[in-house]
């Protein structure tokens, strides 16, 4: 997952709204959103190459999502980062306890951001800094740096989400996730991938022949604990492939 914009509002009629895009090489095999037969009650897409996921929901109101930290010079981790959301969703640990255990093992993974929570709390963990934060109420966002790093694409997504807060509808979340606007060169981050790469990755929705937004996810959580998770899949050039809806 490479972009997540969310509204965390405990006690609100819609305590959690999430709009997220997973960007990946189109050739990397994956399965769309579904219940995992080997982890009952967990609904997520599945990376068939490494076996993990980028975003999902689980029993007890659990939610988990992952973004990579962009650093072309970092060492390859011994384990797949995608296993972490699944491990949390299928466990009985609180988010805080899970992160405490994970902090001792974080060097085994390439750099990542992890969002974990349930209907009571939502936590962020950055593997590079080792810092864990219980999110305050409000709008937050993640791309491939730290929490709320003001990259142009993330600012655009958060500003668009601000206009979706009253009576949120899935289509409004997908509209913000489909924004192809690239940032001006002078506003691009410098992450070591060159100007052409920075331009390509600077839009909320990415489309090219080999790499781009593979999945867009919209999650709406209601005060009674019910959840609606919708995932749309895309292929090369941003071609729409289909949609999966989960009501849990």
Image (cartoon, rainbow, N blue to C red):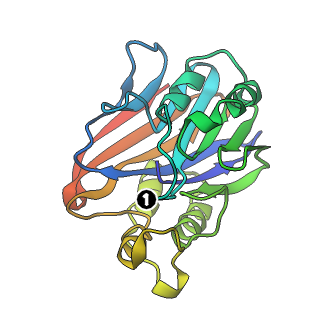
Residue 184 vs 105, above or below: the answer is: below
Question: At which x and y percent is residue 64?
Answer: 57, 34
Q: 206 or 127, which lies in front? A: 127
Q: Which residue is mark 1?
A: 177
Identify the residue at horizontal 65%, vertical 30% (top origin).
105
Q: Secondary structure at mark 1?
A: helix
Residue name at image x 61 percent, y 41 percent: 114
Tell me: residue 201, above or below residue 132.
below
Is residue 13 visible in this depiction of the protein? Answer: no
Which corner quadrant of the image does residue 28 belong to?
Answer: top left
Q: Return the x and y of residue 196 as percentages of the image width and height.
A: 35, 76
Relative image position of residue 13 (x, y in whole percent): 68, 41
Is residue 240 at all visible to an observer of this figure? yes
**In the depicted view, which residue is nearer to us: 232 or 65?**
65
Say few, some or many: other residues with alpha carbon within 10 Å of mark 1 (under 14 / 14 to 19 / 20 or more).
many
Q: Residue at x 48, y 69 (%)?
A: 192
């Amino acid at each position: 997952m490479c972009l997540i914009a969310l509204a965390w509002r405990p006690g609100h009629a819609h305590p959690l709204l999430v709009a997220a895009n997973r960007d990946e090489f189109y050739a990397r095999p994956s399965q769309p959103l579904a219940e995992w037969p080997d982890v009952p009650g967990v609904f997520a897409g599945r990376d068939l190459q490494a076996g993990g996921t980028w975003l999902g929901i689980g029993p007890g109101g659990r939610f988990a999502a992952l973004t990579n930290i962009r650093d072309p010079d970092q060492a390859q981790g011994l384990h797949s980062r995608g296993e972490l959301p699944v491990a949390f969703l299928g466990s009985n640990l609180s988010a805080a306890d899970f992160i405490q255990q994970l902090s001792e093992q974080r060097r085994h993974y390439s750099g990542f951001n992890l969002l974990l929570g349930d209907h009571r709390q939502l936590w962020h963990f950055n593997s590079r800094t080792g810092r864990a934060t219980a999110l305050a109420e409000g709008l937050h966002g993640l791309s491939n740096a730290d929490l709320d790093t003001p990259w142009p694409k993330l600012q655009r997504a958060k500003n668009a989400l601000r206009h979706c807060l009253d009576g949120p509808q899935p289509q409004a979340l997908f509209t913000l996730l489909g924004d192809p606007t690239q940032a001006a060169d002078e506003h691009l981050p410098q992450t070591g991938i060159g100007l052409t790469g920075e331009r390509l990755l600077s839009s909320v929705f990415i489309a090219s022949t080999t790499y781009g937004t593979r999945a867009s996810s919209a999650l709406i959580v209601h005060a009674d604990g019910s959840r609606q998770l919708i995932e749309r899949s895309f292929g090369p050039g941003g071609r729409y492939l289909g949609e999966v809806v989960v009501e849990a």
